Amino acid sequence: MKAKAINEEHLKVYSFGDQDLAIHVCDRPTGGNVGVSLLVGDLSELQVELEARHVPFDGPKEIHAGFRGLKLVDPDGNKVNLFQDRVHSTRSEP
């Protein structure tokens, strides 16, 4: 999977070979929590795994610039966004 290059005010996506790094720029601190966004290859498969493990999450839904994703909080309270370019998505919106 190769992400499209994105350079918007609050989202930057950089590609390094077959790996992509997405950085969401925040205007304000997140209350002491760390936030991370990760591009995933198969969001639908990941959703099934999270459901099987009873991990609470919000989504899937359109997150930003044509990306579909899930939002969750890890056991330490850190915010985690897992998203996939809509072109590669296999599950449709409800």
Image (cartoon, rainbow, N blue to C red):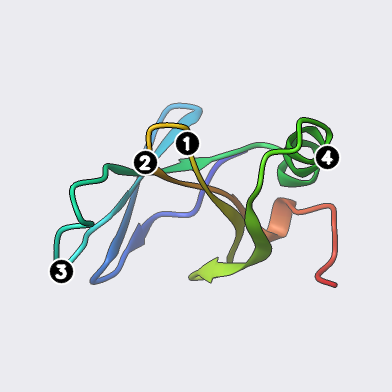
Quadrant where the N terminus sits is top right
- Whether tag 2 and tag 3 are in contact, CB under 8 A, the answer is no
What amino acid does circle 2 point to?
Asn
Tag 4: amino acid: Val
Residue in the picture at 49% in, 54% down: 4
Mark 2 or mark 3: name the one nearer the start of the chain. 3
Residue at the spot 27% in from the left edge and 42% down from the top edge: 34
Looking at the image, which residue is at 80% across and 70% down? 93
Image coords of residue 60 (percent x, y): 69, 61
Ranked by sequence position, the earlier of labels 1 and 4 is 4
Mark 3 vs mark 4, CA separation in Å: 33 Å
Disc 1: which residue: 74
The one of 14 and 70 positioned closer to us in this rendering? 70
Amino acid found under the numbered disc labelled 3: Asp
How packed is label 2: few (under 14 Cα within 10 Å), some, or many (20 or more)?
A: some
The mark found on residue 78 in the picture is 2
Query: How dense is the environment of label 4, judged by Cα within 10 Å: few (below 14), some, or many (20 and up)?
Result: few
Q: Earlier in the sequence, mark 4 or mark 2?
A: 4
Return the residue at label 4.
48
Q: CA distance from mark 1 to mark 4?
A: 17 Å
Q: Name the mark nearer the viewer: 1 or 4.
A: 1
Q: Residues within 10 Å of mark 3 (few under 14, many from 20)?
A: few
Residues under numbered marks 1 and 2 in contact, where contact means CB atoms less than 8 Å apart: yes
Name of the residue lying farthest toward the left = 28
In the image: residue 34, left or right of residue 21: left
Q: Could you tell me which secondary element the residue under label 4 belongs to? A: helix
